[in-house]
Image (cartoon, rainbow, N blue to C red):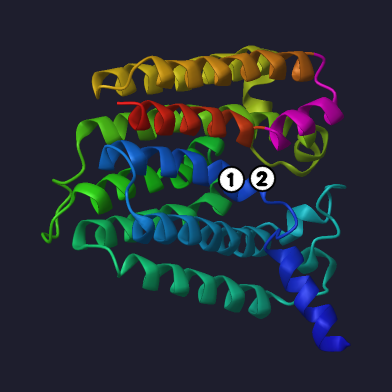
Amino acid sequence: MIAARRFHLYLDLIRWDRPAGWLLLLWPTLAALWIAADGFPGLHLIAVFTLGTVLMRSAGCCINDVADREFDRHVKRTAQRPITSGALGVPDALGVGAALAFVSFLLVLTTNPPTILLSFFGLAVTLVYPYAKRFVSMPQAVLGVAFSFGIPMAFAAAQGGQEWTFAAVPPQAWWLLVGNLFWVLAYDTEYAMVDRDDDLKIGIKTSAITLGRFDVAGIMAFYGLFLAIWAVVGVSLGLGAWFLLGIAAAAAQALWHWSLIRDRGREGCFRAFRVNHWVGLAVFAGVVVDLAMR
């Protein structure tokens, strides 16, 4: 009975019942993988990047909860997380996070040297992010880099050779990373709007606080930049009408999100954040269909 309860605490720690978090990472990574491979990338790479995404997001949750445990006590939404409430200890969380990251690294080792090299940089950003909100006015930008690093890794895995360099990653991959960073800024600012009152009290820096009364306008601008960059890069790489239809579907969802967040209500902002993975799915579907219809 005790073992079962502890297992459920570990599942809660890694947000197992909230898959929206890892879907936000998965769709742009898979979209980049399809683009880099010019179509179906093979079961091996799909498995590596899907499992790796789930594992690293889960490891990131462990690290984040340890770093934020003192702050989370003062935020209603996070006060009952396993580390914050004391149900699990810090060594437990760090051990789980390390184990998940290690398994993810084993998956990366089945790819090639450029991808392995990039994985170290991705891990470094993941470790830095939880502490960025103490010093950076818009820590969501750091999260954007962490959540987007699967994009150059996908290009390296699909197109790279056996040399320990970044030469296998074309400029378009880095532009897709920049575009995806703006999407992360959009949905994580929505998320930050939910906790803005609590964050102001405890002194955490977030994009919602930094943007102030321009928060909604900023979010819509971030959505626009994300979709514009991905559209331009996609077309430059030969993607066509089906891909642009996916971009249009994502844009329609972004407009709907405006209706959810325009009054800055917690419920609407949290709902907008939770359904954001459908924006990524629309773009991914456009990529897959466009490449399949050639």
Residue drawn at (31%, 36%), measured in percent from left and top? 35
* Distance from the alpha carbon under mark 2 to that under mark 1: 5 Å
**SS under mark 2:** helix
Q: How many residues crowd around disc 2 within 10 Å: few (fewer than 14), some, or many (20 or more)?
A: some
Residue 100 in picture, x, y percent from top left: 53, 71
Image vertical order of residue 30 relative to residue 73, above or below: above
Q: Which residue is mark 1?
A: 23
Residue positioned 49% across, 21% down in the render:
246
Return the x and y of residue 136 as percentages of the image width and height: 53, 38
Give x and y (percent) for residue 243: 41, 21
Residue placed farthest to the front in the image? 293
Residue 34: x %, y % from top left: 35, 40
The secondary element bearing badge 1 is classed as helix
Is the residue under label 1 in contact with that under label 2 (CB below 8 Å)?
yes
Magenta span: 263-275
| x 43%, y 16%: residue | 244
* Numbered mark located on residue 236 in the image: none
Q: Does residue 98 sit above or below 265 in this rendering?
A: below
Amino acid carrying mark 2 in the image: Ala
What type is the residue that disc 1 sits on? Answer: Leu
Q: Residue 185 appears in which quarter of the rendering?
A: top right
Residue placed under numbered mark 2 in the picture: 20
Q: Is residue 202 left or right of residue 242?
A: right
Is residue 242 or residue 4 the one in the foreground?
Answer: 242
Q: Main secondary structure of the magenta part?
A: helix
Asked whether the viewer can see residue 134, the reply is no
Magenta-colored stretch includes residue 225 = no
The residue positioned 73% from the left and 68% from the top of the image is: 11
Q: Is residue 211 left or right of 235 when viewed as pictured?
A: right
